[in-house]
Amino acid sequence: MKMVTAVVQDQDAAKLGKALVKAGFGATRLASTGGFLRAGSTTFMIGIDDDRLDEVLDVIKHSAKKRDQVMTLAFSMDTVESTVAAPMEVEIGGAIVFVQNVEQFHQF
């Protein structure tokens, strides 16, 4: 058995959730926050049999797309007076996926 943990951007979460249900996967959905951009994200925890790993990864891959977005980021130098705000194109979205072996699974 495997535990798949997928972190996706909030705007991809509904699409992924529906795709997982359609494909017959159960998932626990948790609200989370991204690191560098501090953007909203959703973490899905999915327990699956080993033989369905490629299938669930395919569902995630096709539901969480990378995209470019222009964002204004503030960079602080040594003092407040030297803070610089600059528009930058950054890649957002996609999914970060962790796959772990599960020794035991219990549902009470």
Image (spheres, rainbow, N blue to C red):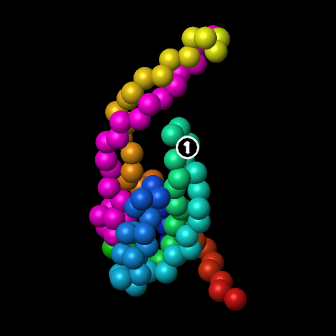
Q: Which residues are magenta?
A: 57-78
In the rendering, at what x and y percent does residue 21 appear?
41, 81
Closest to the observer: 108 or 20? Answer: 20
Closest to the observer: 85 or 75? Answer: 85
Q: On the rendered structure, is 84 left or right of 71? A: right
- Would residue 38 be counted in the magenta stretch? no
- The crowding category of the residue bearing disc 1, from other C-alpha atoms within 10 Å (few below 14, some 14 to 19, many at least 20), is few
Which quarter of the picture shows residue 55?
Answer: bottom left
Q: On the rendered structure, is 103 left or right of 53? A: right
Which quarter of the picture shows residue 56?
Answer: bottom left
Residue that badge 1 annotates: 38
For mark 1, give the secondary structure: loop
In the rendering, at what x and y percent does residue 33 appear?
58, 51
Q: On the rendered structure, is 34 left or right of 60? A: right
- Amino acid at dot 1: Arg
In the rendering, at what x and y percent does residue 96 appear?
45, 53
Q: Residue furthest bottom?
A: 108
Q: Residue furthest right?
A: 108
Is residue 38 among the parts visible in the rendering? yes
Residue depicted at 48% across the width and 29% down the height:
73
Q: Is residue 79 above or below residue 90?
A: above
Residue depicted at 36% across the width and 75% down the height:
19
Q: How many marks?
A: 1
